[in-house]
Image: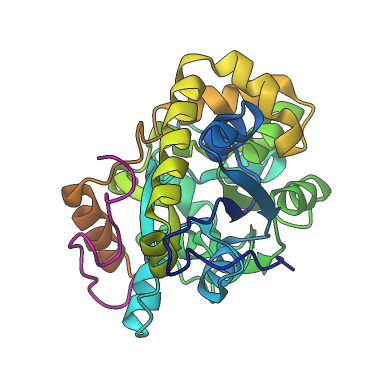
Amino acid sequence: MIAASACGGDAGGEQQKKITIASAPNVFLSALYVAQDDGMFAEEGLTVEIVEVESGNDSVAALASGQAQYADVGFEDLAELSQAGDDSVIMAHDILNRVTLTLVMRKEVAERKNVTAASPLKDRLSALKGLKIGITSPGSPTDTYMRYYLASVGLDPERDVEIVPLGGGSALLAALEKGQIDAYHLSPPTPYVAAEKGFGVVLIDGPKGEVPELDKFDYTAWATSRQWAEDNAGTATAFSRALAQATTKVKQQPDAVATQIMDDLGSSDKATVLRTVKAMSSALSDKGCFDAAVVQRTLDVMLRLKILEDKADAAEGRLWTNKYNGC
């Protein structure tokens, strides 16, 4: 359970300097860990508490309830909230410009299905037929994008596969190793870990942008309460500024960053973390800026892929803003 933080700025304009972040550990959040560990948040006068959640659904709930000031979520989450009449949350700092979900399959299953990373994309996705596929939770990106992959090759997610909710990356990795599931997809590093340990085969390497429709695509961003950001504009701007500074280090010093963030990830596998940091680098937004054309493309693709049921408004100020990221 996430402890509620202090309220926003008061009538006198005092800025809240303590921020609670709801997130699940992931390499694409390297800038967050670097900004915390290197004192970049502290230099901005911020006290940041990072609270672990299992999935994106939990992150949205933490934001909507005011239990966290920031969470990394997808545009589909905010679009669904907005369509339900809730405009309380807004994207304020971009993180990833492509979908980085990485599909890994048990080695013996991939061999039986006769697929490798070099197989045509359609064949890799068709090989999912009849398998047990792990996801974090229903409605999460691991669920919605998996359903898109299946439908794209004519498979029915309800009939042709068994989708198994298991929680976070460690649970998915363990289930794959034990043979409790046949495949899953998640942003690295856990799919890479499965490959490095020899029991998994990476079939879609998300950070490389192997699925054309999901490249140049706003996959994940830092969202915040619209009202909180308005009340604490200076704090929101300082948060983005620290993240942008940390992102520069992630891109320029991947080896140092890989060593630095291992504790944040709960990992002792330096080689895999370094591989992931390097792989993610090209997908990371440099300064957290949103591009209106990319947002429009993202929402259009989500609608076409049936990730969204209804058309969403791509105009600035509706689901996203560059007001606090200096862009």
Q: Is residue 169 left or right of 215 when viewed as pictured?
A: right
Residue sitting at x 71%, y 66%:
3
Tell me which segment is drawn in magenta. 308-327
- Of all residues, the one furthest to the front in this rendering is 12
Residue sitting at x 17%, y 62%:
315
| Magenta span: chief secondary structure | loop
| Colour option used | rainbow
Residue sitting at x 74%, y 68%:
1
Give the image location of residue 32, x and y in percent: 56, 38
**Is residue 184 visible to the viewer in this orientation of the structure?**
yes
Query: For residue 229, which quarter of the picture?
Result: bottom left
Q: Is residue 282 left or right of 15 when viewed as pictured?
A: left
The C terminus sits in image quarter:
top left
- Asked if 287 appears above or below 303 in the picture, the reply is above
Give the image location of residue 49, x and y in percent: 67, 49
152 is within the stretch colored magenta: no
**Is residue 115 visible to the viewer in this orientation of the structure?**
no
- Of all residues, the one furthest to the right in this rendering is 178
- Asked if 64 appears above or below 280 in the picture, the reply is below
Viewer-nearest residue: 214 or 23:
23
- Asked if 161 appears above or below 203 in the picture, the reply is below
Viewer-nearest residue: 313 or 47:
47
Give the image location of residue 19, x and y in percent: 58, 53
Residue sitting at x 62%, y 46%:
48
Give the image location of residue 219, x and y in percent: 39, 50
